[in-house]
Structure formats: C-alpha cells, structure tokens
Amino acid sequence: MEARPVDPRPLPAPDDVSGFFWNAAAEHRLVLQRCASCSNLQYPPEVCCQRCQAEEFEPAEMTGRGVIYSYAVVDRPLHAGFVDALPYVVALVELAEQPGLRILTNLVDVPEGTEVRCGMPVEVTYEDRGSITLPQFRLSGARR
C-alpha cells in the first residue's frame, strides 16, 4: 500500500469582513479594525464593534509588538499538515496598542533551549504561503 502524501496545512479563507486584514498582511503590515464610534481596536475582524456594536470601522496599523498573554506547546498534530512542525507553540499575544487586545497566533523562531513564559515581549513576523501571508510572532530580538 502506497503512503498518502501529508495534507498541506489549512489556510485561512479571506472574506468581505477580513479581506483588509489579509491584504495588509500580504504587505507585511498588521492592520486591525478601529471602531469609528468608540475607537475600540478589535481582532478578529467582525461586522460590528465588540464594545458598542457600531458597524463602521477604520483600518488601524499596529506596531506589531506585544507580550505573551498565554501559550501552549502543541506536541500532537491536530491536522496532518502540521506533523512536520511538531512541536510548535500557539500563543495568545496581547498587543501593545490596547489592554486586552489579543491575537491567537503561532510563536515561531524560538531559539533552542528557550523556555517560553507569559509576559515575554514578542514582535510580528510574516510567513508568505503562496496566495496568503500569515502574521505570526517571535520573541523580540529573535531573528531567522
């Protein structure tokens, strides 16, 4: 019996609400929604403000800096496309622009032997994956 090839990693599917986010990511920019009514920043993109339910937004470019709020080390694949990436770190990053503004992401380029901890400073980096670019985070100062 022939071995089946490993499935590729699933990719996000941009839509009318999130398209601006993915277009900015393709330019290696982290852009979120800012409510035109109350100035609340939010992620993920939604049709209305999480704070005041207004439906008008303006794009807001983030610095890409933040801290690890929470994280998990994944050592079992949740999808066949991630087998070769094991183990990997999924992190909830609190962005510098607003308390409570958090983005769920991968933590990449973690130097071997580094113990990841909550509160560690991180910065955005980008993985170009063909038709889409994924914003991810790395420890501040870590380079590929």
Image: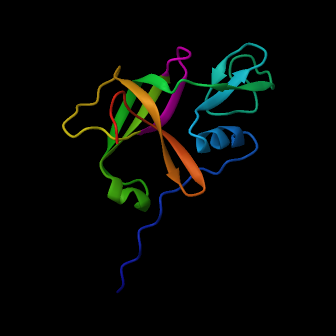
User: Residue 114 lies in magenta, yes or no?
Assistant: no
Q: Horizontally, is 104 left or right of 52 in the view?
A: left
Residue at image coords 69%, 17%: 51
Q: Horizontally, is 20 left or right of 131 in the view?
A: right
- Relative image position of residue 133 (x, y in whole percent): 56, 47
Marks counted in the figure total 0
- Relative image position of residue 90 (x, y in whole percent): 40, 39
Quarter of the figure that contains the N terminus: bottom left
- Relative image position of residue 108 (x, y in whole percent): 37, 41
- Relative image position of residue 80 (x, y in whole percent): 41, 62
Q: Give the range drawn in magenta.
A: 95-106
- Which residue is at the front of the view, 134 or 46? 134
Residue at image coords 69%, 40%: 18
Q: In which quarter of the image is residue 82?
A: bottom left
Residue at image coords 45%, 22%: 66
Q: Is residue 14 above or below residue 38?
A: below
Q: In this view, does 78 lie above or below 144?
A: below
Q: Horizontally, is 126 left or right of 107 in the view?
A: right
